[in-house]
Image (tube, helix red, strand yellow):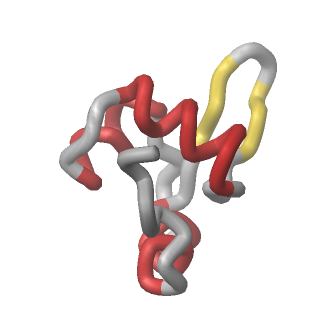
Amino acid sequence: MAEPWLSADDIADHLGVTKDTVYAWISDKGMPAHKVGRLWKFQVSEVDEWVRRSGAEEAGD
């Protein structure tokens, strides 16, 4: 079964951060996200791998 695409709200809940933090990570930290029309969509596997590679490191900047 294909992995579902999650919204910014869903991925923020998954990571325990705010949606604003997710948007900041997309632009500043290279968080993996895909633009579908006006919406950002995420695959949990891609985001989890990015976090494991320390993509969110120093996120409090």
Q: Position of residue 57 (x, y in %)?
A: 44, 68
Instruction: Name the residue rendered at 80%, 19% in the picture.
Output: 37
Q: Position of residue 42 (x, y in %)?
A: 56, 49
Q: Is residue 11 left or right of residue 25?
A: left
Q: Position of residue 48 (x, y in %)?
A: 43, 73
Q: Position of residue 35 (x, y in %)?
A: 77, 34
Residue 49's place in the image compared with 41, above or below, is below
**What is the number of callouts on the image?**
0
Q: Is residue 15 left or right of residue 7?
A: left
**Residue most toward the front?**
61
Instruction: Name the residue rendered at 73%, 44% in the picture.
Output: 34
| Of residues 32 and 36, the one drawn nearer to the viewer in this rendering | 32
Instruction: Name the residue rendered at 56%, 45% in the picture.
Output: 25
| Of residues 37 and 54, the one drawn nearer to the viewer in this rendering | 54
Residue 45's place in the image compared with 58, above or below, is below
Q: Is residue 33 left or right of residue 14?
A: right
Residue 11's place in the image compared with 8, above or below, is below
**Residue most toward the top?**
38
